[in-house]
Amino acid sequence: MTAFADQTCAALATVSGCDLQVPLVQGGTVRYANFDYAASAPALQQVTERIADLLPTYASVHRGAGYASHISTDCYEAARGSVARFLNAADDQVVVFTRNTTDSLNLLAACVPGDTVVLDVEHHANFLPWTRHGRRVVPIADTIEETIQRIVAELCTKPAALLAITGASNVTGELLPLERLAWIAHQCGTRILVDAAQLAPHRRIDLRTTGIDYLAFSGHKAYAPFGAGVLVGRRDWLDAAEPYLAGGGAVRSVTADGADWALAPQRHEAGSPNVLGVAALAKACDVLAELDEATVLEHEQYLTHRLRYGLKTVPGVNFLRIFRDSTDAVGIVAFTIDGFEPGRVAAYLSAEHGIGVRDGRFCAHPLLSRLGVDAALRASIGLGTTAADVDRLVDAVATLVEHGPNWDYANTEGHWNPVPETRPFADTDSGAAPCGF
Ligand SMILES: Cc1ncc(COP(=O)(O)O)c(C=O)c1O
């Protein structure tokens, strides 16, 4: 905590929207305080620059003879190397580009030759795809230790092909001991998949040393919001499975009667790929890999602690937590406030303070039910977050609890909005505040 233990903890990287001015319902504007990194993180400046550089040579991938096609193809294929280096992937692990984590997990679900064991804390993306393919749900206990014992019991009682587990909870940020879980799974003849949608943007992951067999994450949560995701994993299941999509690019040759399918990764990448999204994701991996790991961790932990300590002083604030014995979490703080509906609080923070948080059930309904809350607020932190942002959020929550909102809010079809709504909503083409760097 030393380097950041003052009032001026600044952003660690320049991200798009860091100077964004947003209108307030009571009039005037304020700098946007973004606490929604866990949903979609803003683009790193280097990612935006990379896309701008590539646009002139943007062309078809794998199929064109033109110069620009060569450049685009090289850039697309080189991106696999960036992702593999970022994760220290093993030699038999291939990098398949997808649309997002959900896509990656659905892809893998169709390749698994047997049952998949999951916990009931998962984001729906790592819960629903397995339903169709032999899903066995292990209910969590209130400690990580006891939960691991339940996983062991499940895997020992009946063989499973895969243990599909989240690296960091999208609700509370809590981390599971992945290396240990990989070891346990392997002892039982089971492979392990990590849903790293929340982990990869925050922590370095080493596939070789942890023994993780498959890993999925999304570019848009890792500072590359251009529509690409990734599945990295062992080749054999991916080569043996039916192609995820049938179409051009996934085949070696086609006759009137059938097709000779390519091996992974092309096997699962039919259709024209998202070359710019993939280039963005690769650039983000390169930039994140270059950042000093200890500094990133310190920045995030400092701000997370500051936020927690600040909110703790506000009467009625309750934090969500899954495991009694968890000791580490990424920069996500989920909470409720006694007497205040989360959606209304989120609307208030946005309308009166220019602060963006997430409210609801976070696509983790089983977990929220288990935690006994219908909905909550979630503030998530990233490389562009500052101490000033954190203090604004704490102050805004404290003001709400002490004085109530200064505006009226109404719930229409499940969404809270200020009444009257005075803020102009326009896209950037029609004059909304520009995103400056
Ligand atoms: C832990 C986790 N897994 C999976 C997903 C799904 O990611 P995407 O919407 O990018 O497919 C999310 C999204 O919030 C997530 O937090």
Image (cartoon, helix red, strand yellow):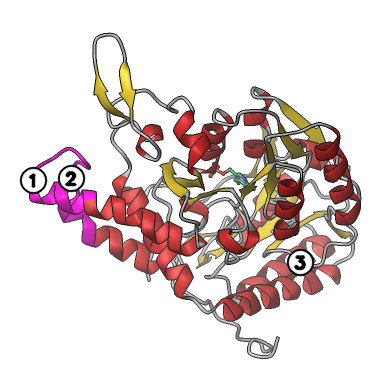
Instruction: Name which quarter of the figure residue 204 lies in.
Output: bottom right
In the image, residue 19 sits, relative to residue 162, either above or below, namely below
Magenta stretch encompasses residue 62: yes
Q: CA gap, disc 3 to disc 2?
A: 44 Å
Point out residue 422 in the picture as x, y percentages from the top left corner.
53, 49
Of circles 2 and 1, which is in front?
A: 1
Ligand 1 resides in the quarter of the picture at top right
Q: Is residue 374 visible?
A: no
* Relative side of 33 to 342, left or right: left
- Magenta extent: 53-73
Precedes in sequence: disc 2 or disc 1: 2
- Secondary structure at numbered mark 1: loop
Point out residue 366 in the picture as x, y percentages from the top left corner.
79, 36
Report the number of discs.
3
Point out residue 271 in the picture as x, y percentages from the top left corner.
31, 31
Q: Which mark is residue 22?
A: none
Q: CA gap, disc 1 to disc 3?
A: 50 Å
Q: Which mark is residue 328?
A: 3
| Closest to the observer, 337 or 430 | 337
- Secondary structure at numbered mark 3: loop
* Relative side of 353 to 63, left or right: right
Mark 2 and mark 1 in contact? Answer it, CB < 8 Å.
yes
Precedes in sequence: disc 3 or disc 2: 2
Point out residue 7 in the picture as x, y percentages from the top left corner.
65, 86
Q: Disc 2 marks which amino acid?
A: Ala
Residue at the disc numbered 1: 66
